[in-house]
Image: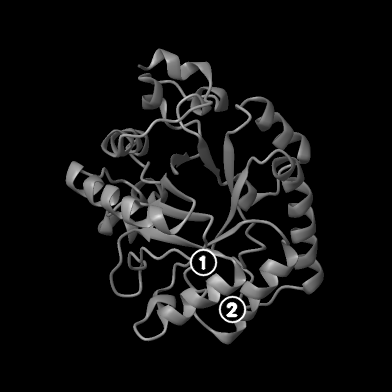
Amino acid sequence: MITLGLTTWTEHPSLLGGTDNLTLTEYSGVLPVVEVDTPFYGIPKVSTVAKWQKEVPAKFQFILKANQTMTLHDTYEDGLSMDALKTAYREYRAMLKPLIQHGQLKAVLFQFPPFFERSTRNFHYLQRMVQWLPGVPIAVEFRNQSWYEAGVKDSVFDFLKDLGLIHVIVDEPHAMNDGVSLEPVVTSPKLAIMRLHGRNQQGWSAKGKDWRGQRTLYRYNDTELAAFKTMVEDLQPQTDEVCVIFNNNSGGDAADNALALKEQLGISFGDLGPQQLDLF
């Protein structure tokens, strides 16, 4: 199975050929999965998750970012109390329950900071993640190239396989110590996730106040999308599902790229909302 999705649901009016922000219901009428980043900043209430569920078809699924405490952002060097860490995991597990009960959680995405390098300490942390989120599909996105160094990356992939972790296949600019290489490796028999951030090297390295507006400012061309099509088809026999998430949306390009890849792959999504009927 192949699924496609975007990061957030409001910022993609071109999914419906308009200019207004989309509702979750409108989004779920076109694509079967969405990545939600709000849990990174603050763990949502269970009532918020229940509201999302009421707005989507029964088979629609969510990828939720792990909270920033759980990914060790801003606390790594100074250390983090075990109590604070365990509290974050406990609250996060409670938030996930409605989605798990209804089969609507595709994965929890741990997008680690660039300073989360390959080390014994961090290998141990990956093990703890699995212990603290038992039975939860966990996807890991590394942003430090040390995980992919020649001679060691195969051992890293084997480690992820042993833990049952989903390796996130990342497409992003990478030069020097900024960004990671594209490594189309599957570590879970159930799910592979590709996250496509664009290839705007200058914007990716931007340090000014508008860096967020430049970082994913990129539109994949047809040739690049065709290469992704081939990659997806190569990955498909290795796992039950390949899910492709487009995050290249600083200029509103993610939705158009997702629809173009959908056409190249020749796939369709069933059990979506009624909006889909208005598109074709």
57 or 220, which is in the foreground? 57
- Mark 1 neighbour class, 10 Å CA radius: few under 14, some 14 to 19, many 20 or more: some
The residue sitting at 30% across, 34% down in the picture is 266
Q: Secondary structure at mark 2?
A: helix
Q: Quadrant of residue 182?
A: bottom left
Q: Residue furthest front?
A: 237
Which colour style is shown?
Answer: one colour
172 or 270, which is in the foreground? 270
Q: Mark 2 — residue?
A: 122
Kind of residue sitting beneath label 2? Asn
Disc 1/disc 2 C-alpha distance (Å): 12 Å
Q: Mark 1 — residue?
A: 113
Percent position of residue 249, x then y: 37, 41
Q: Secondary structure at mark 1?
A: loop
Q: Does 181 sit left or right of 240 as displayed?
A: left
Q: Does 209 sit left or right of 91 as displayed?
A: left
Q: Determine whether 183 is above or below 193 in the image.
A: below
The residue sitting at 77% across, 40% down in the picture is 46
